[in-house]
Image: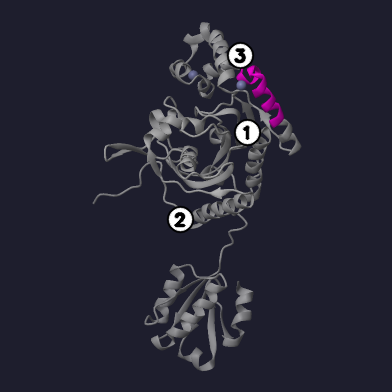
Amino acid sequence: MIKYQRPRGTRDIFGTELERIELINQKARNFFKLNGFLEIKTPTFESIELFVRSIGEHTDIVEKEMYTFEHDKKLFVLRPEGTASVLRAILENNINLPGRFLYVGWMFRKEKPQKGRYREFLQIGIELIGESAPFYDAECINLARTFLNTVGAKNFFIELNSIGCSKCRQEYKKMLSDFLKSKTDNLCVDCQRRFEKNFLRIFDCKNDNCQKIYDETPKITDNLCPDCQAHYLKTKEFLKKMEIEFTENKKLVRGLDYYTRTVFELKLKGLGAQDTIVAGGRYDLLMKELGGNETPCIGWAMGVERMLLALPENMPEIKENKRFFIAVMGEDLFDDGLKLRDIIINRGGICIIGNPLDKIKSQLKDANHYRADYVIIYGEDEAKEGVYTIKHMLSGEQKEILKKDLDNYLNILM
Ligand SMILES: [Zn+2]
Ligand SMILES: [Zn+2]
């Protein structure tokens, strides 16, 4: 027999973990709705050009991480991120701007699987479209922080940087290139290649030698044009007004071409190398790139799986519901059993009803299998006397409860 296995880097999610994920999604929807966001759902697959155009040809995502397939002589990909799709949807549906958008969805990337990193992963993302003022950069970060607090994540810190506009980046590239001229041979092959195609990304290199060299290089943050510099200063001022602590990381860049000016990450302490749970920034160039009007935008995406690693195992909101099993003895009493089930389920209890044709022994076995906390036995004797027999499975204790007292008794049990 062939054993079927799920693809590497994917998961089957069920039980408490699924409940946790659903709870986070629900909280995100509530929180961002209250902050004026409109949720938008875009297709799971899009034409490949959308991402090549937006993320950039010479990025890891486009070069090697997209799941591609052909249909009707057209190339499609499973979406590797959400932003490009949201902008495409805004343009295609002529949605009024400025606007605030929320998405919650599964993304796909052929990355090396690690703890908290999967090839199919859930992202919650927000986009503030049509806002250019530095206040919105700070507010965007503030919304991430407040949401994390809402779901109970605490030990995170914020890293901030500005990567300027195309104008200051062009001049900076020249400066960096002069500085690195004599050191090119010491850089890893990836960096040598990156420098040509997507030069800011060299700072992402994991190679220690490269990082040592980059420690010494001039940084774009210190070489911004006056406009970008003013924007960055004002952003930091607003963050301070909002009492948001942050550290400046001059080597923080984003792997996507469309980012401009403010970039930021929220990282969790104690998660090791996979510590980034929110990554975002300003992308003033993207809307035009996709065929729209020039529209300033800022947003972020949050990795839900990684964030869950940082939350306490038992999120207080997920309380274990009490589990009941109703053992009705005989078909004649089955209607009463069904009514009883409704009562318990309406009160938020988990309730399974057994096969009324089974003997009590067999029904108790089923109750055990389904980990019932209580079994409510209802047979001919109980019906005659107007009672239920309630068995606590853990202690084995049994108690008869008058039908009219059931409500009060359930209050005590649940
Ligand atoms: Zn600039
Ligand atoms: Zn390198």
Name the residue that disc number 3 marks: 216
Q: Which residues are magenta?
A: 219-235
Residue found farthest to the bottom = 384
Residue found farthest to the top = 182
* Magenta region includes residue 378: no
Residue 294 visible from this viewpoint: yes
* Camera-side mark, 2 or 3: 3
Between 55 and 91, the residue placed more toward the observer is 91
Q: Could you give the CA–CA distance between mark 2 and mark 3, rounded to whole angstroms?
A: 49 Å
* Camera-side mark, 1 or 3: 1
Q: Secondary structure at mark 2?
A: loop
Name the residue that disc number 1 marks: 132
Q: Position of residue 349 (x, y in %)?
A: 54, 70
Residue at (35%, 43%) from the top-left corner?
Answer: 7
Residue at (47%, 37%) from the top-left corner?
Answer: 84
Residue 247, image quadrant? top right
Q: What amino acid is at disc 1? A: Ser
Q: Position of residue 337 (x, y in %)?
A: 47, 82
Between 325 and 96, the residue placed more toward the observer is 96
Q: How many neighbours does mark 1 have within 10 angstroms: few (below 14), some (14-19), or many (20 or more)?
A: some
Q: How many neighbours does mark 3 have within 10 angstroms: few (below 14), some (14-19), or many (20 or more)?
A: few
The answer to whether the residue labelled 1 contacts the one labelled 2, judged by CB atoms less than 8 Å apart, is no
Q: Quadrant of the C terminus?
A: bottom right
Mark found first going from the N terminus, 2 or 3: 2
Q: Is residue 374 above or below residue 17?
A: below
What colour scheme was applied to this rendering of the protein? one colour
Q: What amino acid is at disc 3? A: Glu
Q: Could you give the CA–CA distance between mark 1 and mark 2, rounded to whole angstroms?
A: 42 Å
* Camera-side mark, 1 or 2: 1
The answer to whether the residue labelled 2 contacts the one labelled 3, judged by CB atoms less than 8 Å apart, is no
Mark found first going from the N terminus, 1 or 2: 2
